Image: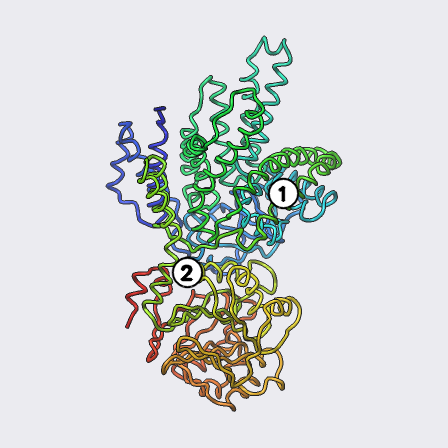
Amino acid sequence: MRARPLLGPALGLALGTAIGLGGTPFPRPVAAAFLLALSPPLAPVAFAAAGWLAADVTRAGPPRPPAGPAVLSGRIASPPDRTGDRVRFLLRPTEGDLLEVFADPTAWPLALWDRVRVRVELRVPPGPRNPGGRDPAGRLRAAGVALQASAVGPVVREASPSPAAFLERARERLADAAARSLPTREAAVVRAIGTGDRAALDPDTTAAFARSGLAHVLAVSGLHLVVVVLGFERALRAALLRCDRLAARADPRRVAAAVALPLSGVYALATGAGAPVLRAAVAAAAVLGGTLLDREVDALNGLALAALVLLAGAPASALDPGFQLSFAAVAGLVLWARPIRRRLPVPTPPAGTWRARLLEPLLEGTCATLAASVATAPILAYHFRQLPLLGLLANVAAIPVGSALTALAALGAIGAATAPALATPFLLLARPLAWALLALADGAAAPAWGGLGVGSPGVAGVLGAFALALLAGRARGLLRGAAWLGAAAALLLPAPLRALAARARGGLEVTFVSVGQGDAALLRLPDGSAVLVDAGGAPDGGADPGARDVVPFLRDLGVRRLAAVFVSHPHPDHVLGLVAVARAFAIERVFSNDDAGGGDAARVLASLSPSPLPPGARWARAGVVFEALGGDRAALSGNDASLVLRVSYGSTAFLFPGDVEAEGEATAVARGGLAADVVKIPHHGSRRSSTPAFVAATRPRLAVVSLATGNRYGFPHAEALARWQAAGATVLRTDEGAVRLLSDGQAVRRVPAGTALDPLATLRERP
């Protein structure tokens, strides 16, 4: 067995970092464990203590409430990242903690180490929206960032651009050259692969690469660094070997390695310094350094070295999905690719034969892809709630194409940095490769069965799946099969168990999902079926709440299909999220207010073929009755024509009035039947809604307002909330997180939103 002295310390450092990132304070007595570093067998314990301390020290304290606009001066502490029409970067001010800054681009691009001054408005980062959702505030705090800053003026340099600014300028020049020479989608792919610039990728392209299992080809990582840096090293070595004079004076291997060694760091910076490419840069540096020292580097030792370097420098990088996927994929390759190949019923062909030249690389590539796919499956399920079923086949075809495209894109970037015209030949050669890569991604993502939607297995499920997979790799016979089945169960069963627990508990569960400035509510009926009322939407662009919030939440709860969807009215903030929902789940029926709408909302609604639910009409399932209230909508329009939906279960009722305002409310009051235990406050708490007559007619105990933090409309208006509170209602807000309520048919009570993902806690909710 090979000696791997770095593996234990790396695992110890990772464990300690995880403890610290979990928020557990570092106890001072644990510092005594540092002395164990003097004993090699106990060194992992010392590294665990070091990781724990580093993560604890790095974590930012509780955010101080922002005190209005401020002028900040400091150095940029991360490579700037384009997000839409803004640039995002970390700023280390002259005084104070790190900040995440969003600013407009500058004429000469901002870069790592630039010294700048900027006027900003500070804000506290948002926490998790929904159970199992992402936690931006938690991740930023782990990295030492307590506040975000939005620039209200230009970013001004206080000194000459840093050397890294020239790398950023090269990225911009490649973007300009690609826009001139290539179609839009192909140009975006070349930019992403060539320099790590993902700003031009549209949501559909990003989703296609994720669903097809080709996202790693699009994100600069080890594959790209190997092609560029080690490809350059091999080419230089071959050229030196052809020159007898140089080969006689110096070892071509060492000369090529010495020249290529700094290139790995430059390439990582030039492509955005993401965790995957940094991991690859450290590993490449180890390999090239080994060549200089005439030492062979063990793959696991190299991976451990990369983990030690990255976690020591930035403990919070362990929370980055790219970091996790990169290390898991390489570990899978090292541990399982060769064993999988040995178990194939195809003997290894003799060297020099056509089978060795053609068939064996194909088989080895397939085994490597399978090993990496198995290793990354738990992380994909945890973060992205989907597993690409066609990823194996897609990768076999896409990796050669992506490798060639990487080389051409890198040459194009070098050409653009030198003189824009020099990039054109390389970009034209890259065009068919970019088209082919897009075709592969689109083709593998197109079939409904091409991706398996899964619920997040949770941290316990991920760890259990990895532990059992490692056991399967070392076990034999029936134990191996049982271990693989156990790993699959740990990955796939948590979501169905949550659904079974909710069905066993019974009752009507209503969750007002936090979707930003929009509406979405999930109802789980006593028989376990699911109904959705609206699905949010982003009318001004940006992240789609349907894909970001609604679909992951439904998958985590084990929802496989929707018994019904009710659309209050065809406005973007209620409808656009249904695109992602309809793509992810079968929908048995859709009801609407019979308004076709306009623009994107109309196209989305038309694709769902809704049935109108006129006032007085009902639909029932599992003892829950859905009834349309209000008067004749023909005399109303816009918000006032919203579907006013009353959902009753036993003697309890929930009222969903959409965005009705004064006129629509008056019509509903005139018809009657509005009394409810819970009311979704109309039109996000606008002052033009929640009239005294409507509030008096509903008489709720709880009133829920759905809105985004700091929305531009100023919702909810104070006078609207005051009317509900004066009527005795407790007001709950989705900008503070999802609101989850449970009815047993006799009373409605609020239950913690987070327990929806805990089957045992769900069972304990039975009255």
N-terminal-most mark, 1 or 2: 1
Q: Which of 583/414 is in front?
A: 583
- Callouts 1 and 2 close, C-beta under 8 Å: no
| Mark 1 Cα shell of 10 Å, populated few (<14), some (14-19), many (≥20) | many
Residue 342 position by quadrant: top left
Q: Secondary structure at mark 1?
A: helix
Dividing the picture into quarters, in which one does residue 640 lie? Answer: bottom right
Residue at horizontal 35 percent and vertical 36 percent from the top: 11
Q: Is residue 295 visible?
A: yes
Tell me where residue 366 appears, x and y as whole percent.
51, 36
Position of 379 with respect to 687 (left or right) is left
Is 308 placed left or right of 597 in the picture? Answer: left
The structure's colour scheme is: rainbow
In the image, residue 766 lies at what x, y percent?
Answer: 29, 70
Q: Which residue is mark 1?
A: 437
Residue 73 as seen in the image, left or right of residue 10: right
Do we see residue 75 in this rendering?
no
| Amino acid at the residue labelled 1 | Leu
Q: Could you say which is closer to the camera, residue 628 or residue 299?
A: 628
Q: Residue at x 35, y 59 (%)?
A: 497
For residue 558, the mark is 2
Q: Residue at x 48, y 86 (%)?
A: 692
Is the residue 574 above or below the residue 281 in the image?
below
Residue 158, above or below 759: above
Where is residue 333? Give x, y as percent.
45, 34
Q: What residue do we see at 55% from left, 27% from top?
A: 262
